Amino acid sequence: MKANCSSEFLGTEKISKLLLSFSMPAFIAMLASGIYNIVDTIFVAKGIGTLAIGGIGIVFPIQTLYAAFAQMISIGAASAISRSLGEQNNNRANQVMTNAYILTTIISILLMITSFFFINQILYIFGSNEELIPYARDYLLISIWAIPFNALALLSSAVFRSEGNIKISMITVLIGSLFNIALDLLFIFVLNWGIKGAALATVLAQALATAFSLFFILSHRSIVKFERKYFIPNLKVSTSIISVGFSAFARNGASSLFALITNATLRSYGGTVSLTAFGTVNRIISFFFLPIMGINQGLQPIASYNYGAKQPDRIKQVVKLALIYTTIIGAIGSIVGILFPSTVINLFTKDKSLISEATFVLRLQLLFFWTIGLQMVASTFYQSLGKPIPSLFLSILRQFIILIPLILILPRYTSLGLNGVWYSFPISDFTAFVISALILWRAWHHLNKKSDDN
């Protein structure tokens, strides 16, 4: 496995070829993660039962919150590394990477300790009820051990992307996803370890992905290197990483907060069936979300490098192509949600009441899914340029600023009741799309001026 010895091709290669070569491995990796989410849910449903899906649905936003901390460091570091390489400053790239691994390890250990001490409180806060908590607790108790492995694997994948080693980034993600599926089969159906087996599969798969990524770096096959002199985190570098990556944390943190509030509302207005329907639909939607994330992962190093190299025309080209690709994927998601929702839900359960509610929820959540690509590209665009404030705003716009208030208001203060929760999704999707489009349009004109100046 040979690594690229230079990242200069990021500033010279044809943009369409570059985005395709970067996005396809990331797309494949994210698609594999999406398939894992779907297959894992099917395995749990068939091998353990419907309530187990609800239990995992409760844990899913908690895991998203853990991932938010990891992505804060990984995305902030990736942007800084790509910009440093674009400026031909390899020493700073090495410093950023080394600091990022130290920060990730420290944060992961703190999250593990907190989770072990407050596991029951965390599960109730995130909306679990008495029927679901035995499954949720068994799953989370083991999944906690995956926190550092998942965080380090995410960071490694981001580092590889930032330096142009997109295939190694893909392999890191694929190891986690494919081994997870294989171990799920073994632990759930062969060894009959139930939901604990599903959690253990996640821990072991992420440990393997982390081991592979660290071996690649320590064997000096990556462009950026660990340096001992940077093992004590530099305050300025750490602050820079966190400030740019905070938008990713905010987006995932808002996702967890939104799930917390939604689960609490569903517990009051709908009960176990609504909680399970929401958990099932969340897993399905992540299948469409992840490929869009893959394209954005391909966009980020290209835009960051060319921003550091002062080539605004290339940034415009890659953003335009990313918008086209992500919108196509989003449109496919909307078509599936509008035309075939019951077909998809039937893959997971034969419970008629669950099928009925989940079908309705899936259709509404995917109605304006074609707008998600632009929202994510706009946020990634500002991340790539190292602009934390607009990136943060765009990251939290849909879920935190629009969706959460709607979920709090519509069921309580209108006659919609439970349906108020479900109708909040298409309203927030379209509103966030309009606002994001206006902000991106303004940034586009700013890039035009830079192009004219050059």
Image (cartoon, rainbow, N blue to C red):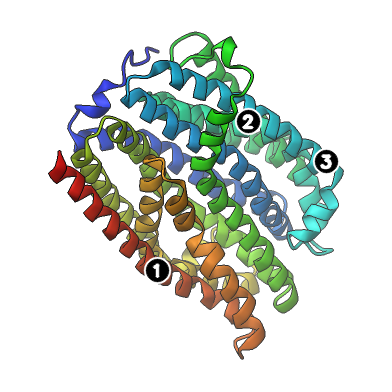
2 vs 3, front mark: 2
Mark 3: which secondary structure?
Answer: helix
1 vs 2, front mark: 2
Question: Is 195 situated above or below 212?
Answer: below
Q: Residue at x 77, y 38 (%)?
A: 142
Q: Residue at x 85, y 52 (%)?
A: 120
- Left or right position of 358 against 193: left
Q: Residue at x 52, y 70 (%)?
A: 402
- Left or right position of 163 against 46: left
How far across and down, in percent of the image, does residue 95 sit?
51, 20
Verify CB contact (< 8 Å) between mark 1 and mark 2.
Answer: no
- Left or right position of 76 against 120: left
Q: Which amino acid type is marked by label 2?
A: Thr
Q: Is residue 19 at least partly visible in the picture?
A: yes
- Tell me the residue that label 1 is attached to: 368
| Residue that extends furthest to the bottom in the rendered view of this protein | 415
Spatial separation of the CA atoms under disc 2 and disc 3: 18 Å
Q: Which amino acid type is marked by label 1?
A: Phe
Q: Residue at x 65, y 36 (%)?
A: 202
- Tell me the residue that label 3 is attached to: 116
How far across and down, in percent of the image, does residue 425 sit?
50, 71
Q: Earlier in the sequence, mark 1 or mark 2?
A: 2
How far across and down, in percent of the image, does residue 245 sit?
51, 41
- Tell me the residue that label 2 is attached to: 104
Dot 1: within a 10 Å radius of its alpha carbon, few (fewer than 14), some, or many (20 or more) residues? many
Q: Closest to the observer: 143 or 295? A: 295
How far across and down, in percent of the image, does residue 83 sit?
37, 30
Question: Is 62 situated above or below 363?
Answer: above
Dot 3: within a 10 Å radius of its alpha carbon, few (fewer than 14), some, or many (20 or more) residues? some
Q: Earlier in the sequence, mark 3 or mark 1?
A: 3
Mark 2: which secondary structure?
Answer: helix
